[in-house]
Image (cartoon, rainbow, N blue to C red):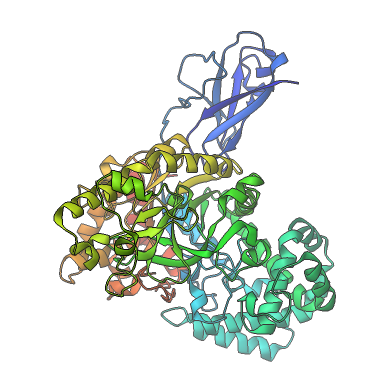
Amino acid sequence: MEKITIKTIGPWMPHGQQIYICGSCPVLGNWDTRRALPMTPTQGIIWHIDIDKDLLPQSFEYKFLRKELDGSFTWETCFNRTDPYAVTETTFPNQHPRYAGTAIPVFSLRSRHSAGIGDFSDIKLMVDWAASTGQAVLQLLPVNDTTSTKTWTDSYPYGGITIMALHPIYLNLRAIGPLRDPHAQEAFEKEAAALNALPQLDYELVFTLKERYTRTIFAQKGVRTMGTKAFQAFFKANRDWLLPYAAFCVLRDRFGTADFSQWKRLKKYSAAGVSRLYGEAKAEMDYYIFVQYHLDQQLREVHEYARKKGVALKGDIPIGITPHSVEAWAQPEYFNMGEQAGAPPDAFAVDGQNWGFPTYNWDHMASDGYAWWKRRFRKMAEYFDAYRIDHVLGFFRIWEIPVPFKSGLMGHFSPAQPFSPDELRWRGFPFDEWRHAQPYADDPREVLFLEDPVQKGMWHPRISAQYTRSYNDLQQWEKDAYNRLYDDFYYHRNTDFWKEQALRKLPELIGATDMLTCAEDLGMIPACVPEVLNDLHILSLEVQRMPKDPCVELGDPAYYPYMSVCTTGSHDTSTLRGWWGESHDGADCPVPICRRIVESHLASPAMLTILPLQDWFSLEPSLRVEDPGSERINVPAISKHYWRWRMHVCLEDMIENTAFNDTVAGLVAWSGRKA
C-alpha cells in the first residue's frame, strides 16, 4: 500500500513533549485533538509520519500540534496547511526556544562517595544541580573503554579500544554490592576515600582499585547474576559485539599488549576463533561481559533519571578509532590501516595534529549502507538524547598522514582532487618532481608537493609549504604561481567535491536515530560546511575565541545562528579565567568581567548555550580556585596529555551553595533559557 510521508522541522524539545498532526479528514482526526496522530522524531528536530495514501482525500487541511508535559496540546499559529509534501518549520508560540547546559567529563565529577573518579551514578547529582538551576542539557566526553595499557595514558577519552563497550572505570562499585569479606570492604573504603581526597585523578591507582573490586565481586556473584533474565536479555541483545570485545580484553591481558599484531594467538580475527576461546576461557571472558552488564544498567538508569528531571544527556562520538582496538582487529576492512588521521596546522598547533587513528575506507562503508556507523549511533542512542560529532569535517574530508610520518605537516586531505604535473605547468608553475617533491637539503619535510597515495603521479601542495627553505629558494614568479595553486587547492578547488562526500554519508548516519545532532566544526573549515550543516539541521559549534570569520579576532555571540551550540570554551581550550590570563599577562579575570562574558553567551540567539563547569565556577568567589591553569582539561598540542582534572568541590556541596546556584539560576532565567 502506497504511503505519504509528512514531515516538519520542529524545535528541539525536552523529553516528554511531542509533535502530533491533526486535520480535516477522518485519518487525521477531523480536527479532534483526542484523535490526533503522534509523529516520530529523527535527528532530534525533524518529525515525520507515514500515512496510507488511500486514506487521504485528494485535498485536505492539517496542522501540527505540540503535546505539552501536562498532556495539553498547543496548536500552530499559522493558517491551515494544504501541501503534505512541503517540509517547513512548525509555527508554535515561542518557536525558537533556547536552553542552557553544562559540559563536564564524567571522570571530573566528585561526590562524597566517589572512589577517586566520577562514576555513572555521580551523574545523577549533576543532573539534580542542572535541573535546580533551570538547565536542560548535560554534556559529557566519550565514555567508551580506553583500556589499552592499564596506565595513565589510557586517560585519553578519545582513544577508545571499542566503539560499543563502556569504560569499567566509571562503574559505581557499591551499587553492584559489598565484598563478602568485611575486612576487604573496609580496606576498599579506606583506599577509595584516600583517592577521592586527591586534587586530581590518579588514573592507575583508581583503575587498579576498581578492577580488583570487580574481579572479587564477579567471583562472588557472577554465576548468579548471569543466570538472571535481565542479564540474559542484555547478552542476547549485545552478543555480536560483547564476544569480540571480551576476547580482545582477554588476549590483551594474556599477551600484555593491545597491539594484536604481537599476539601469539588470534592476531587475525575470526569468529570461529573467538567462539573457541569462549569455550576455553569462558570465565575470563564472562568477567568482562559481567562488568559491561552492570555499566549498561547504571548508565541506562542515569539516562532515565535525567529524562524524568527534564535534563538531556549529550554524548560525544569520536571521529576515529585506535589502531589497536576491537574494531581494527575484527573489522579491518572498514579502515585504511596505513594512514593516520589528524588535523592541519592552526594557531593552537603549528605542526598540525596526528591522532594516530586509521582513516576510514568510506567506499567499503558505503557498500553496506554505512551499517558500521548506524550501529554505532544506535548504541549511543540507548544512553543519550543528543550527541556531538567530534571533528565533523572528517565526514567531508580527513587530514591523512602516512604511517611513517609523525608531523601533521606531512599530511594531505583525503579525499581530494590533486593536480597532475601537466595541470601544474599549465597553471604557470614549472613542476619538477626531483626539485619540488623530493626532500630539499636532505630534510624530508622540505617538499612543496606530496604525492597522492592512491592516485600515483598526482600531487597535493604541502600544507604551510611557504615556511620551508624549498619555497624560499624559489624565484618570485615561481612563488606567486605556487601561491595561486595553493590558495585554489585549499579554499576553492575541492569545495563542491567535499560537499558531495558529506552528503553521501551524513544524511544516512544522522537519520539512524532521533538524537539531536551537534557538530564540532572548528579548524580549517571548507566553505561548503555551513551550508551542509544548515540543510541537514545539524547544530554548529561557536567558540568566541575561535571565530568562523577569519577577518575578526573574536566572535560576537549576539550574531551566532540559532542552529548552533554557543560556548565559552571546550575541553581542548583553557578556561575563561585561563584565557583572560593568557591575554592579560597572567592577570586573573575579575568576577564582574566573567559575568559579562557569560551573560553575552547566554543572551546569544543560539539554541544551546553550554558552558564548561569551570566557567560557571568563575562567577562565584567561593568556588574560584587559586590557579586557573589547574582547571584545564587538555592541551591538544601535547599528544600524551594526562586527562585528570576533577572538580575541587563535591557535588553535594555545590548543590548546597545557595549563592552560586542563585547566580546560575538567575542568569539562566534572565536569558530566557530556563527549561
Q: Position of residue 6 (x, y in %)?
A: 59, 24
Which quarter of the rendering shows the N terminus?
top right
Which quarter of the rendering shows the C terminus?
top left
User: Where is 279 relative to 375, above or below?
Assistant: below
Q: Residue at x 63, y 18 (%)?
A: 32
Horizontal placement of 455 versus 587: left or right?
right
Front one among 391 and 192: 391
Front one among 524 and 636: 524
Horizontal placement of 411 versus 315: left or right?
left
Q: Residue furthest top?
A: 58
Q: Residue at x 48, y 24 (%)?
A: 88
Q: Residue at x 37, y 38 (%)?
A: 562
Q: Is residue 145 visible?
A: yes
User: Where is 534 relative to 547, above or below?
Assistant: above
Q: Is residue 602 visible?
A: no
User: Where is 361 relative to 254, above or below?
Assistant: above
Front one among 537 and 579: 537
Q: Position of residue 4 (x, y in %)?
A: 65, 21
Q: Quadrant of residue 426?
A: top left
Q: Quadrant of residue 471?
A: bottom left
Front one among 527 and 11: 527
Q: Position of residue 558 (x, y in %)?
A: 26, 42
Q: How many marks?
A: 0
User: Where is 170 relative to 498, above or below?
Assistant: below
Q: Position of residue 140 (x, y in %)?
A: 49, 60
